[in-house]
Every structure is written in C-alpha cells, then in structure tokens.
Image: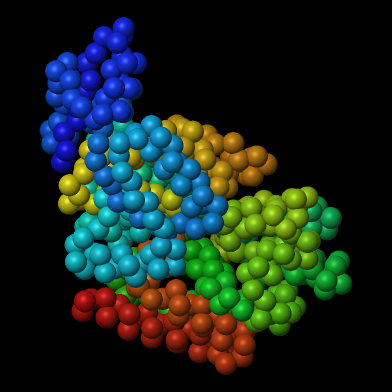
Amino acid sequence: MKKLVKNIISMTIIMSLTLGLMACGSSNKENKETESNQSGDTVSDTQDSKQSVTGSLSILTDATGSEFTALSQVNDRFMEEYPNIKVEFVSLGADYENTMKVKMASNKLPDVFSTHGWAKLRYNDYLMDLKDEAWAKDIDPAIWSLVTDGDKVLALPMDSYRTGFVYNVSILEEYGIEVPETLDELEAAFAVIKEKSGGTVSGLHIGGGDNWMYGAIINTLSTPLTSTDVAGAGPALLDGTYDWNEYKILPEKLLEYYNKGYLNKDCLTATFADTTKALAENKAAFVAMGPELITGALEVNPDFVGAIMPIPAIHDGDTPSFQGGEKNSWGIWKDTKEADLAKLYLEFSAQPENIELICQATSSPSGLVTVEPDLGDLGKYWTLYENNPVYPMWDRTYMPNGMWDVMSVAGQDLIGGSLDADGFVNQMKSEYLRLREVAENE
C-alpha cells in the first residue's frame, strides 16, 4: 500500500509551495513522511492529508437509475475531497450478481462492493469485519441482524430498505377506507373499491407481463403467512421440514382476488410501467412494493398522493410488518490491499449529507440512526410505523437461490390458468427441495 505523506509547511509559504509542487511534481526537504497506511490506522482527516493521500480503489455496484445517480454524486464528492485517489466506480446493473459469482469463485473481488441485501447470506465469507468503524455503532437496530454476524459488522447500510404495500391515499380517502391492518381488512377494502368505482379502479394492481411482479406479491405475503414471530414457520423453512400444505392459502387468495375482479383485468399482460401509471392516475389502490414506486408515480403525475403501509397480518394476534434489509450498502473485500482507503471511502459515505442524498433517491429511511433524512410527506409514514417489526426479505432468508424465478413463473401460471392452487404449492415445494439439494452439493 502506498505511503501517506503529510506536508508540514509554514503558513506564510503554503500557497507558493503548493503551487510549485503541483506544477513540477518535485519534492521538498520540508516534506516528510509521517504516516503509513500499512499501519492499519485510520487515514488522517486533516485538509493537508486529504490532498496528499494517494492510491486507487475499485468500487462495484448494482445500482441503476436515481440510485446510481445519487451514489455517483457521493463518489464525485469523495474524489473532489481526495483528488489523488483514483477511483474506478462501475455499475453492472442486472449483470451484477452473475459477475460477483465469478469474482467470488476466483476470490478476486473489488475493494468496495455493494452487498445489496446479501451481506450476511451471500457475501459474509468475503467481507472484512467493520465493527471498529465509528459509524458501526449507529446502524439501525431494525436491520442490525441483517448486516452483522455475531459481533462482526459486514457492511455500511446507507439506506434501510423496507417493503410492504404502497397505496393511493386519494382513493382510500374518497371511498372512506381505513388503512388495512389484516388480510381480511385488505380484502374488504378491495370489495369496497370495486363496488364504489364500478370496477374502474383495481384494488390490487399487478403488472404481470413482467412476471417478477407476481414474485413480489408472493414474496410479500409469504412473510406474514410463514415467518413472523407469530407465524413461526421460519425454522422449518430453513431446515427443510416445512409443511407446504400450510402454504396453500396464498395461491387460493390470489385466485380469489382474480376471480372476484379485485385485480386489474390485464394483470397477465400489463407491465411494471403500467402499474406505476395506474397508481399515479388513480386507477389502482394497492401495489405490493417499496417506496421507489411512489417516486416513479410522482414522475408520471406530480399531484399523486401516495403512502406506504406494513404488510397486513394474516394470523390472529399478529402485527402488520415490513420486509427489509440493507439496500444501498458498501462492504469491503477482506483481502483488499487498500484496506485503509476502502475504510476511508465508507467513512466518507457515512457522513450525514451523503446518507441523506442516498435516502432521498430511494425514499427510504436511513441505515444509521444518527441521520434523519428529509423524505417529504413520505417521512411521516416511516415515523408512524417505526415500531412495526421489520423481518428479513423472505426469499433471501428462507428460499434457496433460484426460487425467485420459480415464484414469479408459478404466480403467472396460477393466474393464467395452467396451475391450480395445489399445482402451485407442489411446484413451489418440489423446486424448493431441488434447489436446496443443488446448494448443498455445490
């Protein structure tokens, strides 16, 4: 690792000496080496050291759209403050996961990389322990278990992703509907919306032409069905002993919603863009999604009024809950040769103004309790539900790799008529068991 050099110079000659050094790149006898990155100490934060810190970092993310724009702005701020650190900052978008699998197989990872919800379950063995970093003690308790392993801190969570149901405030107010807290109340809301709108407003909108939206609704409802503290089936899902007969209620409910006309009529051909447009134009009331959908709807209709609510409870005595985890998050490769520079990058990213920028791009709460981003009207909902439990994303925690695609296709086939509720459950069970076996044999 390259050594850090601190220029010790008198204030009377600082401007001329600095300009001279920049112009010719020469050294001066008054300059001396005072620090070394090889010591493992945190890089000094003085203005002189910022100018003299040198090195390079490779940084890889999966972020796209407004999230990538915000991350890029933070990266630009870092390079402006540390102009002599060369940063290779790249987003791979949809190719990220496959690329990271190759890099993990060869144990050649970027110095800093996005853990995108998988710090604990996928990248744990490749991540440096960050428990001694100043920001680590400030991680939101709601997601602490998702970015730590014992006392090992795996990543810096810049925003705290929480997904439940996005809803159209104007529609609920027009039809006198209270925010549902149980699945029964949600279904009752669907019925009122259908009746009072004459079928022109969808209770639940699914842009199923993009079949991942079936994956989204299935994944969302699977948490209150199986893995809340009251549901209690999490351990059985993890050890492979889950009774899949108990899962049948989920496909039965989806079929019921379709048959009663609670879903949009084009739920097999509409796209996610259509869902966003329908919500924005007051033609849809509920969508199983995170807050980024509200951001998209506001781009379609600046007058749109949207909110987010927890996933309604299914079992008696349960509480509405969110699914969540880290979203935009940085981990450091444990074998990086630029450990101090990588830690410096995370320290800079954790500054309040940078965390706020990321949170505003995703309309999500901060991953650090010391930062309270201004999220406009949406912020009041995060405050309203700050005590509702946040459970880890269902597919990431309980399903083997590959089950997301299984859920998405099975949901589409269920509504399309090629699977009934029993067939849906059998397909989920068989693929769950098969993919578990594949994972165990890898």
Work out whether residue 317 can be spotted. no
Q: In the image, is 38 to the left or to the right of 124?
A: left
Taking the spot 54% from the left edge, 68% from the top edge, the residue there is 216
- Indicate the quadrant containing the N terminus: top left, top right, bottom left or bottom right: top left
Taking the spot 47% from the left edge, 39% from the top edge, the residue there is 355
Give the vertical position of 244 relative to 391 (above or below): below
Residue 103 pos. (x, y %): 25, 65
Instruction: Describe the colour scheme in one phrase.
Output: rainbow
- Residue nearest the observer in this picture, 317 or 287: 287
Residue 405 pos. (x, y %): 45, 77
Give the vertical position of 123 relative to 73 (above or below): below
Q: Residue furthest bottom?
A: 418
- Residue nearest the observer in this picture, 364 or 311: 364
Residue 3 pos. (x, y %): 16, 33
Taking the spot 33% from the left edge, 80% from the top edge, the residue there is 435
How many numbered dots are placed on residues in this image? 0
Q: In the image, is 218 to the left or to the right of 108?
A: right
Work out whether residue 203 can be spotted. yes
Q: Quadrant of residue 262?
A: bottom right
Give the vertical position of 75 relative to 282 (above or below): above
- Indicate the quadrant containing the C terminus: top left, top right, bottom left or bottom right: bottom left
Residue 383 pos. (x, y %): 58, 39
Q: Quadrant of residue 381?
A: top right
- Residue nearest the observer in this picture, 238 or 437: 437
Q: Residue furthest top?
A: 12
Taking the spot 78% from the left edge, 66% from the top edge, the residue there is 283
Q: In the image, is 256 to the left or to the right of 55?
A: right
